[in-house]
């Protein structure tokens, strides 16, 4: 019997609900190359442990003495990144993931700080007590339990294609940013998509801004293909606090009387975008697009009204720009910008339907009047108010994808009754980032990013 000490890599992928570790890539000892053909998914006992420093983050929810049990879905020979390779020196163990399976999540939401933070996930990889595997000589092998230090590195699919944690400062206001440059660049100038994260993705680690929502899709073929052979650049700025920060002290402008919607970061963000464009001469300055979710949806509107004639189009999602800030002067600017708005009626955070007002975070009292005639529960606020006012002014290129709720459309995740899994109502960015916002425009069925790619100043 051969006792094998193993080390492993992890592979993380972005999903609609956030990131998940999907693969354990185990390094094989050349002296005892394993016979993968005889391996079965039920051979393995995989346990995960999630830590922040020395603190085990899930210990208050379940008994973590033996960790979270992880379900194995497949095993195969691979390279170090988990790609199938019959001549590889690794074998990959695929893990089952899902929106409610925390065992493989490298992210945790802090209720105290209202932000997402990475946690260190390590795995105990062993064989079940009544199972063994053989090496290529037929000798039985036992995998010795892995420990925290046996994890070699993590690969973030698509996210690693971004250049992360780049620093920027303007007049003492500091930002961090990630950027993606298309691989198939041509002599033709290419567009730029600027994505502004939500409140939960602030900080100084841009991987959170890219993986916290499925921003990886902006760099994936799903979206890149909409922008022709060359694709599009992607810029993901990150604030250390929130975009709705009035004074640099994390004070929400929407909760401060007479704030007029000001953001501490407006000019710093604009200079970052402009400097990035100047540093990348292959960017088409007539095709710079701006979008974001929630806090970033607010900041999308804030940037449009403060810097007219710079962005070719915008796509705010679950935006939190207060109706009182939509002055005539600002609407004069906004009505000229091609815009595609997205929101869900059952959003309990940025509330647009009075049925959910009791759970509201940013909605203020007194905005139940002027309701949409076709749905008397809709509030005249946020996305509803923005769309209604722009339509009333005759805006020529304004679209609104208003969903009843946010559900899984991939037919992959189900609830206990077998129905499509339902996400939190605030997560309407799932539809947008999956390019599932669709309208009939001039008689043709057009998706959000198909529409966006055609816009020019």
Image: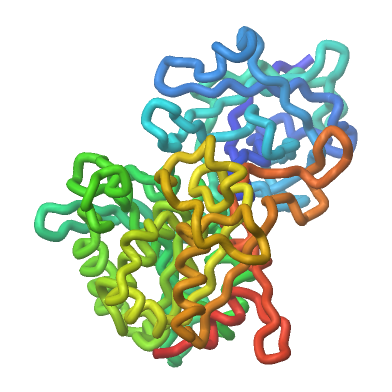
Q: Pinpoint residue 45: horizontal percent, then vertical percent.
A: 76, 20
Q: Pinpoint residue 247: horizontal percent, then vertical percent.
A: 18, 47
Vertical relation: 407 (above or below) 119: below
Which image quarter: residue 307?
Answer: bottom left
Q: Nearer the viewer, residue 342 or 147?
A: 342
Residue drawn 58% across and 21% down?
49
Vertical relation: 55 (above or below) 313: above
Specify the quadrant that holds the N terminus: top right
Tell whether 8 sits left or right of 330.
Answer: right
Q: How is the image coloured?
A: rainbow
Q: Pinpoint residue 345: horizontal percent, then vertical percent.
A: 62, 53
Q: Nearer the viewer, residue 198 or 60?
A: 198
Can residue 160 be seen in the rendering of this structure?
no
Vertical relation: 66 (above or below) 367: above
Residue drawn 67% across and 20% down?
68
Which image quarter: residue 442?
Answer: bottom right
Q: Pinpoint residue 55: horizontal percent, then vertical percent.
A: 44, 15
Specify the quadrant that holds the C terminus: bottom left
Tell whether 198 sits left or right of 452.
Answer: left
Tell whether 269 sits left or right of 452.
Answer: left
């Amino acid at each position: 019997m051969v006792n094998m000490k193993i080390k492993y890599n992890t592979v993380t992928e972005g999903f609609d609900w956030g990131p998940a570790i999907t693969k354990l890539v185990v390094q094989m000892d050349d002296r005892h190359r394993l016979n993968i053909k005889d391996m079965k998914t039920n051979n393995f006992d995989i346990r995960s442990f999630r830590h922040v420093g020395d603190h085990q983050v899930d210990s208050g929810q379940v008994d973590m003495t033996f960790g979270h049990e992880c379900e194995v879905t497949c095993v195969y020979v691979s390279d170090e990144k988990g790609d199938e390779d019959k001549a590889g020196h690794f074998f990959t163990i695929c893990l089952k993931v899902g929106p409610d399976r925390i065992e493989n999540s490298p992210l945790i939401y802090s209720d105290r700080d209202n932000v997402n933070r990475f946690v260190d996930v390590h795995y105990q990889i062993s064989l079940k007590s009544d199972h063994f595997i053989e090496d290529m000589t037929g000798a039985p092998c036992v995998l010795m339990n892995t420990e925290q230090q046996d994890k070699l590195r993590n690969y973030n699919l698509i996210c690693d294609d971004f250049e992360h944690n780049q620093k920027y400062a303007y007049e003492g206001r500091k930002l961090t940013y990630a950027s993606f440059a298309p691989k198939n660049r041509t002599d033709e100038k290419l567009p730029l998509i600027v994505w502004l994260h939500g409140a939960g993705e602030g900080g100084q680690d841009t991987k959170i801004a890219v993986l916290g929502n499925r921003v990886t899709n902006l760099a994936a073929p799903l979206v890149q293909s909409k922008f022709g052979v060359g694709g599009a650049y992607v810029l993901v700025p990150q604030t250390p606090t929130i975009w709705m920060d009035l004074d640099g002290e994390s004070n929400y402008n929407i909760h401060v009387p007479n704030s007029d919607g000001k953001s501490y970061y407006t000019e710093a963000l604009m200079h970052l975008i402009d400097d990035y464009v100047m540093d990348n001469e292959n960017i088409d300055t007539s095709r710079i697009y701006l979008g974001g979710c929630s806090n970033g949806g607010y900041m999308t509107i804030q940037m449009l009204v403060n810097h007219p004639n710079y962005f070719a189009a915008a796509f705010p999602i679950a935006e939190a720009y207060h109706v009182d800030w939509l002055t005539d002067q600002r609407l004069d600017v906004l009505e000229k910008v091609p815009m595609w708005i997205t929101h869900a009626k059952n959003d309990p955070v940025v509330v647009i339907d009075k049925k959910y007002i009791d759970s509201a975070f940013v909605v203020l009292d007194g905005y139940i009047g002027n309701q949409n005639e076709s749905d008397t529960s809709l509030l005249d606020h946020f996305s509803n108010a923005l769309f209604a006012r722009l339509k009333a002014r005759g805006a020529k290129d304004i679209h609104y994808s208003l969903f009843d709720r946010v559900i899984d459309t991939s037919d992959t995740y189900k609830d206990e009754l077998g129905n499509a899994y339902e996400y939190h109502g605030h997560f309407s960015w799932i539809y947008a980032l999956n390019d599932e916002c669709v309208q009939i425009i001039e008689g043709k069925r057009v998706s959000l990013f198909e529409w966006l790619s055609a816009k020019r100043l």
